[in-house]
Image (cartoon, rainbow, N blue to C red):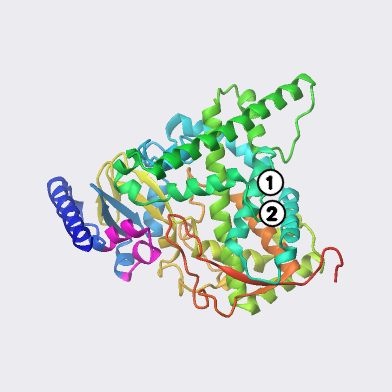
Amino acid sequence: MWIFLGLFIFAVYLVQKNYHRKHKILLGREVPKIPFIPVLWSVLTGPHVDVLEIIPDKYYEAGIYKARLGANDYYTIISADFARTILNEPEDIAPKYQFSSELPVLKFYGNGIVFSNGEKWRTHRKLSNPAFNRALSPHVMGDVVLNTFRYLQNDIHKPVDIYELLQRITIEVLGQVAFGYSFGTLKSKELPDIVRKYKSIINHVESYPSYVFPFLNKLPTKRNRIFNAEIKDFDKFIFEIIDLKKIELAKRKKLNEKKKLNNEELLVSMLEASEQENINIGPQDLRDNMANFFSAGNDTTSMAVSSSIYHLAKYPEMQERARKEVIKALGNEVKIPTAEKLKEMKYVNAIIKESLRKYPAPMTYRQLQKPTKLGEYVLPENSIVKVSNYGVHHDPKHWDDPYKFDPERWLTNEKRHQFSYIPFSIGPRNCIGQNFSIMEQRIILVMFLLKYEWSLPENSIHKEELVLGPAFLFRPKNLEINFRERINLDNKK
């Protein structure tokens, strides 16, 4: 087997090298390249942050590097200046990279706001902006956290997988905020069937080999059959909710009920906006946007709060300082904070910002529609460009001791490059749900600080640093936390 694998790697190397020699277009200085073998190893075994994201100093000096996957060179931006150039380009000059419709990523996400371009993207954005502004609801988020405390009550004496718990929390919040639906993820240890299928879908979507070797997606394998069946079940679930909300909206309109001004469900808000703006948005577009919101609001927020809770476990003095700030603002009682109170907690917000700096959503892909100059380099037309949020956030030119978790860096008046901190991207294609995510992170962390004290287990694999699993999006590997109750909801202390 190892001989076959070695011959396969060598053959791929020769094919790519020959292709590159024939098609090489060099404009300006040549972009530094990551060696082929580490890249292929990462593809075969799953993406590893230490291969493609921990950046050697020589690449930071350039601000850009490239890696070859299949027939394409992928250019990765790790400079704030270069990120500004790419992210500020008009949508028609540097649109989102168009993945093949046969790839798992588009089979699930479809042509919603994340992956669409042109007029379709502008329509999605126009309908989604007001919907997200109206969906900001501290009360809904806080109620879910209170249910989390009840869910944990019987198991608080043993370590808790915090990332898995946060996935339950964020899915429940999304269900209620997006379309007024409770998934019941905090009612029992057994996950609802649709949530299990969603998690299985995401695991397949993040499978690296299926992108580099797209023919794998057409093979009649058991995994492909399961994936396609799960997509059908997920679609059926979403389409049924869309039909239900359309009926509810029609009834409300018939009864001349006044529209709520605040905290409307995302789906209902988009349906209402489409009527008001006379925009015909079909069930498939609504389904695609719901899938986009569902994933973006689940995985990224879960990772960010996991990082905050982990670092407060690792550094108990930070945890105690944050808790004192929360108690000063809210009192020593578990309650749902208001949006105004959340903004007052400067140290808690510094912790959240630092977590997002260390472990952001790692990338955004663009495809250039014209040659683009980046310093000494000129990227050819049709270049596939990845802006690495992680890389930009760890550039030593802008961050002292960039791999250190240091909330203090957010409590000074130091001025930074505007594009040195881009956890939700920036420019015309910035993340539409960033305010939603920030509010949710604040509420979860503040209420956990009031309810619990926590620490790392003695045998934790994360004693020195947060260990990440192999995946497109950052996620911790088996991150268990010991919680100790400070305040009992039934018998407050």
> For residue 79, what is the image quadrant?
bottom left
In the displayed structure, would residue 106 be above or below residue 169?
above
Q: Where does the image place residue 216, in percent across and percent down from the top left?
A: 32, 43
> For residue 482, what is the image quadrant?
bottom right
Q: Nearer the viewer, residue 9 or 31?
A: 9
Tell me the CA gap for discs 1 and 2: 27 Å
Q: Where does the image place residue 485, in percent across and percent down from the top left?
A: 75, 71
Left or right of 174, for residue 291: left
How many labels were placed on the picture? Answer: 2
Where does the magenta region start and end?
38-57
Left or right of 30, for residue 87: right
Q: Which mark is residue 188?
A: 2
Q: Residue furthest right?
A: 491
Q: Where does the image place residue 190, in percent across and percent down from the top left?
A: 64, 53
Residue 163 visible within the image: yes
SS class, disc 1: loop
Q: Which is in the foreground here, disc 1 or disc 2?
A: 2
In the displayed structure, would residue 50 be above or below residue 173?
below
Is 263 one of the magenta-colored residues? Answer: no
The residue lying at 57 percent from left, 38 percent from top is 290
Q: Nearer the viewer, residue 466 or 355?
A: 466
Q: Which residue is mark 1?
A: 136
The residue lying at 57 percent from left, 51 percent from top is 298
Q: Main secondary structure of the magenta part?
A: helix
Q: Where does the image place residue 154, in percent across and percent down from the top left?
A: 74, 65
Residue 127 visible within the image: no
Left or right of 2, for residue 345: right
Answer few, some or many: residues within 10 Å of disc 2's Cα (few below 14, many 20 plus, some between 14 and 19).
Answer: few
Q: Nearer the viewer, residue 201 or 380?
A: 201
Q: Earlier in the sequence, mark 1 or mark 2?
A: 1
